[in-house]
Image (tube, coloured by chain):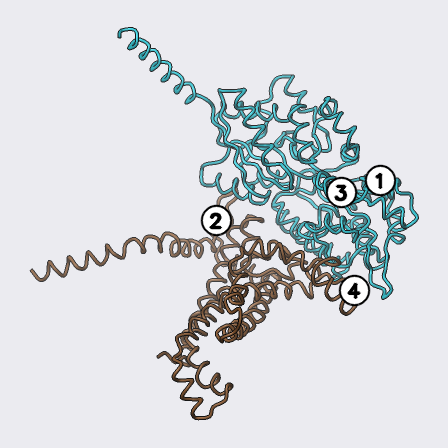
Chain colours: A cyan, B brown
Amino acid sequence: MLKSSFLKAVAATAFTFSTWASAQAVELQFYFPVAVGGKAAETIQGLTDEYVSQNPDVTIDAVYTGSYQDTVAKAITASRGGNPPQLSVILSADMFTLIDEDLVMPFDDYLSSDEDKKWIEGFYSGFMENSQTGGKTYGIPFQRSTPVLYWNKEAFKEAGLDPETPPATWDEMVEFGKKLTKKDDSGNVTQWGVSIPSSGFPYWLFQGLAIENGAILANSDGNKTNFDDQKVVEALQYLVDLSTEYKIMAPGIIEWGTAPKSFFEGQTAMVWTTTGNLTNMRDNAPFDFGVAMLPKKVQRGAPTGGGNFYLFKGVSDEQAEAAVKFVQWITAPEQSAKWTMATGYVAPRPETWETETMKQYVADFPQVLIARDQLEYAKAELATYQNQRVTGIFNDALAAAITGTKDPETALKEAQSQADAILADYR
Amino acid sequence: MRNVTLKREWVLGWLLLLPSMVLLFAFTHIPAVTTFLNSFYSTPRGRRAAKFIGAENYERMLGDPVFWQVLWNNLWFALGTIPVSIALALVMALWVNDRLAGRGFVRMAYFTPTVLPMIAVANIWLFFYTPGFGLFDQITGTLFGWPATNYLGSPETALNAVIVVTVWKEAGFFMIFYLAALQSIPQSLKEAAQIEGANRWTIFWRITFPLLMPTTLFVSVNAVINSFRLVDHIFILTDGGPNNASALLLFHIYEVAFQHWETAYAATLTVALLLILCLLAIGQFFFVDRKVHYK
């Protein structure tokens, strides 16, 4: 009798102690968007659960928040309502917007040791361009991608081209494209040479062309754009010419969403799209396909894209430290390898590619290396203050030129003067 | 004594009104007033608070070519969707009101688009419109040998393509109202007319159509409101493109508010939208109402 009540008392104490301990556990809320098909959401949830079970002193509430657009909208609204998440994955290109809204803080304050500094240096510099400004690190690369060229080897063979050689230059792309464009008896095109999707956010793939022609669309302070640069105009002229002059690309706006499908259906022999589609292509393409770097003009080039981790203002020091530890863990080689394999996103640290898991994956599916190798030539994605508004203006200008409502030069001049009017406040 | 009863009734009345009034104020009137007030301030940013700028937002709106374009688009969208969807709804209702084989199935088929979620519908139509292997191109290609048409990707056709989806979606919904109204028209009127020797057309034009007027008013008010309110499919189909060719006013407001984060300017656009809707509703009720025969 005495013994049992003694045990009860111990149990009760232990119970209160344990609830006290878990009440002391640092709580983190973490928003993440999903922008590609496949198992992205489950993978993030799984990784988070794994971390929490290894680290009982932290609880992480991972919240799936829709698209990138929805996520940034939710994060901004929650912050204005005084209830910001501690951590969120948001477009790397939204960095200036988040700084301007005064919502995020740099990671630097919580990365003081030499080891931490080395960790920051361990990311591909192509990805860090959109993550740092004014000497501070605001974003940690996580779900990052870059556009590549996919080509249909069977179509190449049929057109009398070497199925193992993708176009390396702009001129070659036109030359190959002409051979690949097929027409039926009545003169209707049944297979286009190339597709560069342009719906919604044409700026991203277009930026590849601009970089290849030696142009930089915006400065690194995010307050000056170069839309009317002659090199940008040339790049846009080339894009327009693909449809009007060379007739190797379908006229008008090409839909992002249906682009992989029209590649599978043989409507187009080459397509530019994100590496985020790699796993999708691998699973669904009914023919042998190749992955190549984007062709060059004066240089190779591609924008980066995708999302970074951001640390929000209003967190306690304890929470910030816990958040940083979690970010370090999830970007570490083993976790990062799992993430890359599930989605096709480019692992943001060279060391990930050295792991056994990754090596095996690459041996089986060497196409994934192209995106990594292209990083050497990659430049920051277009990002400015009031980013969505400025890129919106740029998108409208590109669409106007692509659909032939304005000529490239006029469209870009107008876009530049509108962007100048917005960004003048930030200089 | 009488005073007390009166007062008690008065209190009771207000208490009964209270729940719906609270909801109406919290979610309709207060936001509307706040929106109106916000339209006179600048957009607050983290580092800069909102400041009073008078009518500057309105000046910007009137000088903004995108605003005029979306307004113009919306006018076309309204003209393209309202008469067609109402006429189509009426024809469908008249048809499935008659005795015909498989009537239940046809009714269901007409109503299905209404039940489907707009986003799902838009995704299906996206593939209908796809150049090359999309449904429309396959049909026009095999039948007439037409080349692939980029319906959603050309400024000339994008808005019309969106209009077609909207009509397809809405007509079935309006049909239900017409069907209900048709069934409430007494059969004796029709029989009396037949005895007088009226043909089908006269019966429709002199009896059925006038008796359907209250429904037509109701449906047209709804159609007008919907033409300003339905934008879900645009997100999927065209995202307002190319170059705003298919953007409608409400879509543009969303874009400005939640993508560009210019909440003050979005408030100004919202005031414009509210004003348009108020004028339309008033117009419909005061001018059309006189021509409606209620029983």
Q: Looking at the image, which is closer to me, A367 or B274?
A: A367
Q: Along the horizontal axis of the image, is A366 left or right of B181?
A: right
Q: Chain of mark 4?
A: B
Q: According to the image, label 2 marks what residue? A: B51
Element marked by disc 2: loop
Image marks 3 and 1: residues in contact by CB distance under 8 Å: no
Q: Residues within 10 Å of mark 4 (few under 14, many from 20)?
A: some
Q: Residues within 10 Å of mark 1 (few under 14, many from 20)?
A: few
Q: Chain of mark 3?
A: A
The amino acid type found where label 2 is placed reads Lys
The amino acid type found where label 1 is placed reads Gln
Q: According to the image, label 3 marks what residue? A: A216
User: Disc 2 to disc 1, how far (Cα)?
Assistant: 47 Å
Image marks 4 and 1: residues in contact by CB distance under 8 Å: no
Q: Residues within 10 Å of mark 3 (few under 14, many from 20)?
A: many
Q: According to the image, label 1 marks what residue? A: A299
Element marked by disc 4: loop
Q: Looking at the image, which is closer to me, B46 or B291?
A: B291
Residues beneath discs 4 and 1 located on the same chain: no
User: Disc 4 to disc 1, how far (Cα)?
Assistant: 36 Å
Q: Chain of mark 1?
A: A
Q: Where is residue B238, by image quadrant?
A: bottom right
N-term mark: 3 or 1 = 3
The amino acid type found where label 3 is placed reads Ile
The amino acid type found where label 4 is placed reads Pro
User: In the rendered image, is residue A133 in sight?
Assistant: no
Q: Residue furthest top?
A: A3
Which disc, if any, is residue B147? 4
Residues beneath discs 3 and 2 located on the same chain: no
